[in-house]
Image: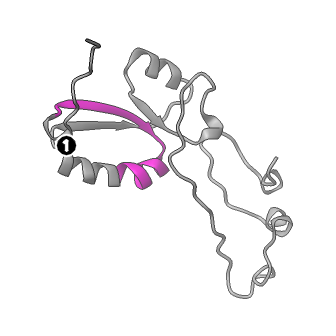
Amino acid sequence: MPLQPEAFDPAQADLTVSIAATDYAQRVIILPFLTRMRREAPGVRVSVQPVDMAQLPAQLERGSLDMALITPEVAPDALRARKLFDERYVSVLRAGHPAERSLDLDTFCRLDHAIMSHETVVHGSDLRPR
């Protein structure tokens, strides 16, 4: 007879899941996840911490983290990854802005931007997809 894993019942689970997540992932994924977890798995505790890319592979390897929520572009090649969702971005322009009627990629790349990045400094000239 082949070995079968025990059935997992979230309602009866008593464990802690450790997740590293960006501030964006905490807002978009973790908050709704916690709401559902309270209902379906009240005994599961979730520990969330900021992502430390320098330590991430070692944290996962030694088991101090169970998973990380990061963008695919920064995921180390040695880690297994699964895409969770696609998203799209929008631009907001003031009324009367010169690009108000037509904002194509070339125009967008020429404009000044306020950009936040955890990993690198990005300038408007670096925005064109490679």
| Percent position of residue 111, x then y | 80, 67
Note whether residue 69 is visible.
yes
Quadrant in which the N terminus is drawn: top left
Residue 112 lies in quadrant = bottom right
| Percent position of residue 6, x then y | 21, 24
| Percent position of residue 119, x then y | 63, 39
Regarding mark 1 in the picture, which secondary structure is present there? Answer: loop
37 to 76, vertically: above or below: below
User: Would you name the residue on which mark 1 appears?
Assistant: 41
Relative horizontal placement of residue 27, taking residue 108 as reference (left or right): left
| Percent position of residue 69, x then y | 48, 40
103 to 4, vertically: above or below: below
Residue 14 lies in quadrant = top left
Closest to the observer: 37 or 10?
10
Relative horizontal placement of residue 96, taking residue 34 as reference (left or right): right
Residue at image point 68% right, 77% down: 93
- Residue that sits furthest to the front in the current view: 1
Residue at image point 86% right, 65% down: 106
Q: Indicate the colouring scheme.
A: one colour
Please give the range of residues in magenta: 13-31
- Amino acid under disc 1: Ala
127 to 74, vertically: above or below: below
Relative horizontal placement of residue 97, taking residue 56 as reference (left or right): right
Residue at image point 46% right, 17% down: 61
Note whether residue 55 is visible.
no
Relative horizontal placement of residue 26, taking residue 112 as reference (left or right): left
Q: Is residue 20 magenta?
A: yes
